[in-house]
Every structure is written in C-alpha cells, then in structure tokens.
Amino acid sequence: GNADAILIMGSNAAEHHPMSFKWCLEAKSKGAVVIHVDPKFSRTSARSTFHVPIRSGTDIAFLGGMVKYILDNKKYFQEY
C-alpha cells in the first residue's frame, strides 16, 4: 500500500490473488505506478497503469532492461 511502483509479471493477480491485489490498487490510488507484464490482456492489465505485452521468452531481457534503467537513473532508495 505504500509502494511507489509495483511490477506484476506473468500473473493475473486481480483474479487469482484478489486479497493481495487490493494493496496494489491502494498504492495506485496514492499515486503509485502499477506495471503488468504479460502477453495476454486481463483484468490485472485493465486495472494497471501500464500493460506491457512482451513476447514469451523475453522476460529476462525485459527485467535486465528495467534493472539497467533503475541503476543508470538512480531510481532506487539509497538509504534502503
């Protein structure tokens, strides 16, 4: 509920994990970005800020790109 960004990858959390997905929606209502990475558009995609429909088998490359962007742009909490 206090996150700035949430990455949901390969899961339809809205339908399969509704009790935990409510915390994602609470964080989104406070301004967090919710990114759903899945080839198929689902209810989770509809409720997320971004739906990223990557091709199957490209998830490791996508995560590597996310980590590189976070490190290059210092988008992490230094104190943490």
Image: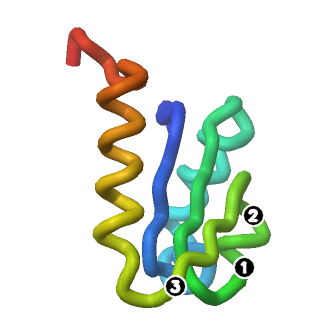
Residue 71 relative to residue 31: left or right: left
Looking at the image, residue 80 lies above or below residue 46:
above
Task: Name which residue lies at 72% across and 79% down.
Answer: 43
Q: Position of residue 69 (x, y in %)?
A: 41, 37
Observer-nearest residue: 15 or 50? Answer: 50
Label annotation for residue 47: 2
Between disc 1 and disc 3, the foreground one is 3
Q: Position of residue 4 (x, y in %)?
A: 52, 32
Q: Which residue is mark 1?
A: 43
Observer-nearest residue: 74 or 32? Answer: 74
Q: Do tag 2 and tag 1 residues touch (Cβ < 8 Å)?
A: yes
Query: Callout 2, which amino acid?
Result: Arg
Quarter of the image for residue 35 reads bottom right
Q: Choose the circle earlier in sequence order: 1 or 3.
A: 1
Q: Choose the circle earlier in sequence order: 3 or 2.
A: 2
Q: Which residue is mark 3?
A: 55
Task: Name which residue lies at 47% across and 79% down.
Answer: 11
Picture quarter with the C terminus = top left
